[in-house]
Structures are given as structure tokens and as C-alpha cells.
Amino acid sequence: MLNRRSFTAFACCALHWSLMPSARAQGTSQWICGTVDKVIGPDTPMALDKFAGETGFDRQVIDTAVRDFQLTPFGTARLQDRWRRGDGLTPGTGMITLGVHFLNGGEKQKETVRLAARRWLEGPLGQSVQFSFDVPRQQAQITVNLLSDRNNSIVGRASATYAQSQSTMNLHDIVDHVVMHEFGHSLGLNHEHQNPASAIKWRRSAVIAEMEKQGWTEKMCEDNIFTRYSSNFACVGSPAFDQASIMLYPIPAAWTEDGYSTGTNTVISPNDRKCVVGIYKL
């Protein structure tokens, strides 16, 4: 567990028994994610001027993004988590190459991760970001534990700070959609259910009661599920709420006041791609 006083975002996923009767009858479970170890406050957003200076973006490009996406002076929190052009294995080349080291696991598991993670790089994003798998740990920005009892990942470039001392991504369910979700976090994406444009009407008592079974407190539910981010967290490239997002976890109808629900999204949506491309191609 990271120090809660830090500004590091660590996104975690825990299994919960679905509230849907059919799933209960079959004894199946759904995975659910909530952000933890994150401080959201007036000191956390990165001012666009600072971001431009650190990343080499021309001020005119920043001004265009502010106009096109109606950003506040602090832009979007995802920019804070964005990997910089000087990060990774190929600084100064125009390509951000993130080294990935597997701490354990079998070859079949590793290949599942490699193939699923690379789906993020299909299309324009692959012109700016690449993953280099199986690098030595001392070169890694992302370290993956494939023998975990949970699914979670540090969000964005903070991963590099911890890669030499701990796993920065833990995978219990080594299936494509979970891997894509966690690598979405590693690229700097947060959970879609906390999108400022989300209109989900939570049935708080049902969510709290269900998550108590997983050891969550009411405050954890407040911080990780109910709280919506401010407009600073709207995604460059795709600021609207995306129900098809790979970053949205399954929501049972019993968790909402109006019966709203979502299934398990298993592919990276077009708006997921617009979002992450907006961050890296600003």
C-alpha cells in the first residue's frame, strides 16, 4: 500500500459477487475496480503552462487544445499522469518506449499480456508510444506480477518511480479485457465511472453493503466509487462519458437508483482510443 499522502494514483480491482441473479445462480464473479491511494485536491492538477514546459509542446498547441476541449487553466489530470517524451527507453527520439518486466509467470500468461497490451498501440497511438516487453528489471518502467491475488496498476508515469522496488501492475485474472484495462491505467487513464460527465445514480446502501464483503469501508466506497472527478479530469480527445469504455467496470442494476447497468466491456472502445491519443498527440 502506497503512502496516501503521496500523489501517486494506484488503481485496483477486486472480485465481487455480482448482484445479478443469473450470475449468483451460476456462482460466477465479476471484477470491479476503484482508485485508491490518490489525493484529489487543489494541489494535484498540473497547470498547462508547466505541462507545456516539461514536455516541449508549443504554446499554440496548448491554446488550441484549451479551445477545442474547453479545458480549465489546469487542463486535465490525465496530462499529469502522461508519460513525457524524455521518459522510457528511447528519450529524444519522438517515441516513448516503455520497458515492461515480468517478475514471474509462465510463457503463456506473458504472451496473453503482450498481445492484449499491444492492442492499445493499434492506430495513431503506436506512432507515439510503444511497449518493450521482457526488458531487465533495471530498465523497466512497468513491473508486472502475474501471481497476484488482485488486479491493479499504478496510473501513468508514477510507475517508473516504483518499478525497481515493487510490482507496479498486479494481475490475477490474466484475460484480455483485464489486461487492457490495467494497461489503460499504465498509460494514464482513470476509471470511466468517475468521469465528470457521468450521471450514474448510485444506490449507495447496496454498493456499500456489497463492498463490505470485500473488506471495503464506507469511505473507500465514497472515494473510489461515488466521487466524480472535477472538470479538470475530463479527457483530452474524448471528454464525454463513454459507456463502452474498457476503463468502465460492470455495474449491476441493483447498484443504481434507476436500474442503470453495464456489462463487462471487453474491447478498447473508439472513444478510449480518442482519449489516449488526445493525451499523447495533443
Image (cartoon, helix red, strand yellow):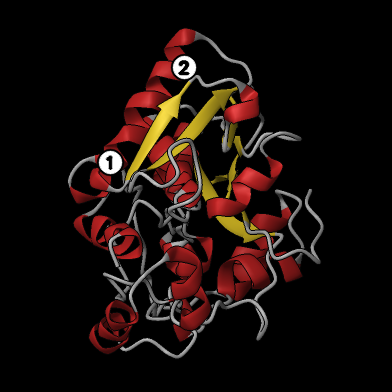
Residue 30's disc is: none
Image position of 19 (left or right of 219): left
Label 1 to label 2: alpha-carbon separation: 20 Å
Q: Is residue 119 visible?
A: yes
At horizontal 35% and vertical 47% (from top left) the residue drawn is 264
Say which amino acid is labelled 2: Gln
Residue wearing tag 1 = 121
At horizontal 81% and vertical 67% (from top left) the residue drawn is 5
| Residue most extreme to the front | 92
Label 1 sits on a secondary structure element that is helix
Total marks shown come to 2
At horizontal 58% and vertical 31% (from top left) the residue drawn is 140
Residue 9 point in image, percent of width and height: 63, 59
Examine the rendered structure and indicate whether residue 248 appears above or below residue 241. Answer: above
Residue 260 point in image, percent of width and height: 36, 69
Label 2 sits on a secondary structure element that is helix
Examine the rendered structure and indicate whether residue 158 appears above or below residue 27. Answer: below
Image position of 67 (left or right of 219): left
Name the image quarter holding residue 143. top right
Image position of 240 (left or right of 12): left
The answer to whether marks 1 and 2 mark residues whose Cβ atoms lie closer than 8 Å is no
Residue 159 point in image, percent of width and height: 61, 46
The mark closer to the camera, 1 or 2, is: 1
Of the pair 12 and 156, the residue shown nearer to us: 156
Label 1 crowd bin: few (<14), some (14–19), many (20+), radius 10 Å = some
Sequence order check, earlier mark of 1 and 2 = 2
Residue 109's disc is: 2
Of the pair 104 and 14, the residue shown nearer to us: 104
Residue 162 point in image, percent of width and height: 70, 43
Say which amino acid is labelled 1: Leu
